[in-house]
Image (tube, rainbow, N blue to C red):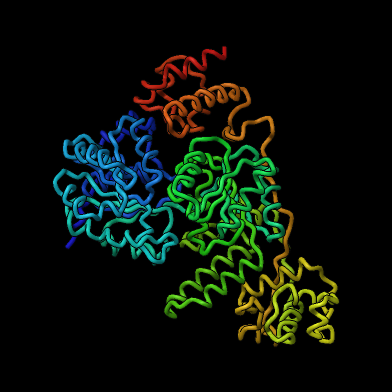
Amino acid sequence: MTAPHPSAPAEPPAEAHRLLRDLWGYDSFRWRQGEIVAQVAGGGDALVLMPTGGGKSLCYQLPSLLRPGVGVVVSPLIALMQDQVDALRQLGIRAAFLNSSLSLDSVREVEAALRAGELDLLYVAPERLLMEGTLRLLESVPLALFAIDEAHCVSQWGHDFRPEYQGLGVLAERFPNTPRIALTATADDRTRADIVAVLGLEGAPQFTASFDRPNIQYRVAGKDNAKRQLLDFIRSEHVGDAGIVYCLSRRSVEETAAFLSENGIEALPYHAGLSHAQRQQAQERFLREDGLVVVATVAFGMGIDKPDVRFVAHLDLPKSLEGYYQETGRAGRDGEPSTAWMVYGLGDVVNLRRMLAGSTAPEWVQRIESAKLDALLGYCETAGCRRENLLAYFGQEYQGPCGNCDNCLNPPQVREMTREAQMALSAAVRTGNRYGAAHLTDVLLGRDTDKVRQAGHQALPTFGVGAEHDERTWRGVLRQMVSLGYLEAGEHYGLSATARSRELLRGGAQFLLREEVLRPTSNRRKSSKSAAAPADLPAAAQPAFEALREWRAQEAKAQGMPAYIIFDNKTLAAIAALRPSSLATLGTVSGVGAKKLEQYGQAVLDVLGGLD
């Protein structure tokens, strides 16, 4: 039985505004942060859906300070808890964490601090929280709230389901009078319903921000030597930038990281097959150093707080638009121009279709997964505004064109190619519905290969009927036909016509081919400008920004923490542009709170003074 949800004031108390300014250095709340803070600080529950970089953490950190007791943050991100705690301590907030990485003595120290009322925030892994000893410990101390971060993990429909999250329903039972706030960057209706049911948030207000990330440029292209395409993309637009490259397999991760490194791009591999120490080292280097690229499976990235990731690339199709949105959202958390770049080919589509067809899940589950895959492929193949397509999936109306996706910047050509689709279907049927795309292409182009001769397919009526087109065109036709369900892949990747193809063969449906076009390079940076500098930084402020950046790097190294925890690039750029000559003036810069002013203010002034 959960407690009723008390109504809270629409505006947070004056103390909230004071803390926002003094600790975080911000003059005002973003979006509906103020309402959320008021709701939770007033004792109410909440479900918050806010895109990556939108300011979710403030929505539970600030109420934890406004309410008596400690705020308990449930997070699956064991490897990142230290950095999250370091960032809070930099603000003067008393924070700690409990997870399996701590020694027994360290655990006892944290528990003693908790009992003594010496903590404002405690980060806990879900496995640790659900231990009976931890639950009893929390029952013995005053609690401000529970924050369940990455809340989509409770749902089997979420792209990152964690079984241990399903046990968090115990919080509503054991702590009915402690407010709960669940937060995630993305959740479709089904996932959202699971979050509400599992966490006992029925009746709690839901705060849903726009899913739009206007600073991210979305781009999708056909796969044609993916590693070389990736290298060209980085060299032309993101040299010296931090980026994440996602691959489907561990082998692809290793090969891609090695390829980039051999070609002058510093890249690190990350996948579950590496040791814990290797993964931790890669993650720590990525967070602490500038300009590194991590090549990873989807095991990497959830909760990455690094604000200046300038690109996220996919060399293989993700499994759903939810996963794609979550992964691409790790780019541009600082609001600066960033790129979500993806290449995909027929093999990707075939693999995903085969995985779905071979699933042993119940039929109703397969229907849902099939709809998710159709939505993903529809996004890839669309000739319209990608942002409009992506946001529509999450139920948000967006009137395109956005002007910041490949299709808007360089509209693709769409050709009516029903006749060619019929040729492809005829080739598949006449060759026995068991040959792959490469062989069908050879038949359509009239290539006299050993395989064609051995099968006797040079005698078929379809042999050479597609010679007027090139191989790339036929690859596009076959890929889109598999995407649209006219062809399906069998056990040995042979393509066969589906029941849906009959309408196309009879002329009752039209096949429109989205032709590949040259991709824009509007994010290309001038070589004279630092890759880390915000796009709108005046040229005159560049030397000051670089000097501050060098000081920040040394300070971060001395403290063993990521540089952005001290000051992010946006704050450094504001300081460089203002060139304050006093602590009072420096304290007016957004992102410079009282604690950081006290700790770093004079050092910043000294750096700026040394430039005169």
In the image, residue 363 above or below residue 278: below
Residue at screen point 45% across, 18% down: 603
State the image coordinates of residue 133 (x, y, percent, origin top left): 19, 51
Q: Quadrant of the N terminus?
A: bottom left
| Left or right of residue 239: residue 16 | left
Tell me if 156 is positioned left or right of 228 in this view: left
Whether residue 348 is visible here, answered yes or no, is yes
Q: In the current view of this chain or complex, which residue is farthest to the left? A: 140
Say which of 212 and 548 sits in front: 548
Q: Nearer the viewer, residue 160 or 143?
A: 160
> Which quadrant does the C terminus fall into?
top right
Percent coordinates x, y for residue 69 in the rendering:
19, 41
For the point 80% across and 80% down, the residue is 452
Q: Is residue 62 above or below residue 300?
A: above
**Location of residue 57 by image quarter:** top left
Q: Horizontal and vertical percent for residue 386?
A: 59, 58
Tell me where residue 79 appears, x and y as whole percent.
Answer: 40, 45
> Dividing the picture into quarters, in which one does residue 379 lie?
bottom right
Q: Is residue 31 visible?
A: no
Q: Out of 525 and 97, give the one closest to the viewer.
A: 97
Question: How many marks do you count on the picture?
Answer: 0
Q: Residue at x 54, y 48 (%)?
A: 214
The answer to which quarter of the image holds residue 433 is: bottom right
